Image (cartoon, grey):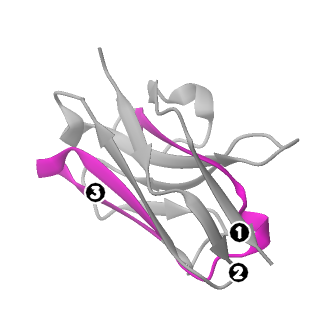
Amino acid sequence: QVQLVESGGGLVQAGGSLSLSCAASLRTFSSYAMGWFRQAPGKEREIIASIDWSSPSTYYADSVKGRFTISRDNAKNTVYLQMNSLKPEDTAVYYCAANRLGYYRARSDEYDYWGQGTQVTVSS
């Protein structure tokens, strides 16, 4: 059974940094595109970063561009999200997801596997 397990969330002050990790039990992890989504209370889940199977092709939402960095280590079946200069509006549950197409996709229904989510809270 495929599992994606996020870690690294928590509480941080505005301007601080957090690093999220997502370990995937995908046998062919390197062929999947990986995405990070987030969902704030009362809002829809949105994609904020994605990395293609053939990194370093990446995508960032405008709201996080220049502050967040997505990367992957195929040897460890892990994708990372480095979050710097965090703002209160970054507060959300963050999810990693995998899509077998191997390339950036914006819609959550185009992803095949999901993690359970990790809470990120940024205080002002």
The residue to which callout 3 is attached is 72
In primary-sequence order, the first of circles 1 and 3 is 3
> Is residue 41 at least partly visible in the picture?
yes
Residue 31, numbered label? none
In primary-sequence order, the first of circles 3 and 2 is 2
Give the SS element for disc 1.
strand
Q: CA distance from mark 1 to mark 3?
A: 24 Å
Answer yes or no: do the residues labelled 3 and 2 have beta carbons within 8 Å? no
> Is residue 103 at least partly visible in the picture?
no
The residue to which callout 2 is attached is 14
At horizontal 70% and vertical 80% (from top left) the residue drawn is 14
Across and down, in percent, residue 40 comes to 77, 48
At horizontal 62% and vertical 36% (from top left) the residue drawn is 107
Q: Which residues are magenta?
A: 69-98
At horizontal 53% and vertical 56% (from top left) the residue drawn is 9
* Quadrant housing residue 48: bottom right
Q: Is residue 10 left or right of residue 122?
A: left
Answer yes or no: do the residues labelled 1 and 3 have beta carbons within 8 Å? no
Q: Is residue 78 left or right of residue 47?
A: left
At horizontal 81% and vertical 78% (from top left) the residue drawn is 124
The residue to which callout 1 is attached is 122
In primary-sequence order, the first of circles 2 and 1 is 2
**Residue most toward the front?**
11
The quadrant the N terminus occupies is top left
Answer yes or no: do the residues labelled 2 and 1 have beta carbons within 8 Å? yes
Q: Residues within 10 Å of mark 2 (few under 14, many from 20)?
A: some
Disc 3 marks a residue whose amino acid type is Arg
Disc 1 marks a residue whose amino acid type is Val
Give the SS element for disc 2.
loop
Across and down, in percent, residue 104 comes to 46, 47
Q: Nearer the viewer, mark 3 or mark 2?
A: 2
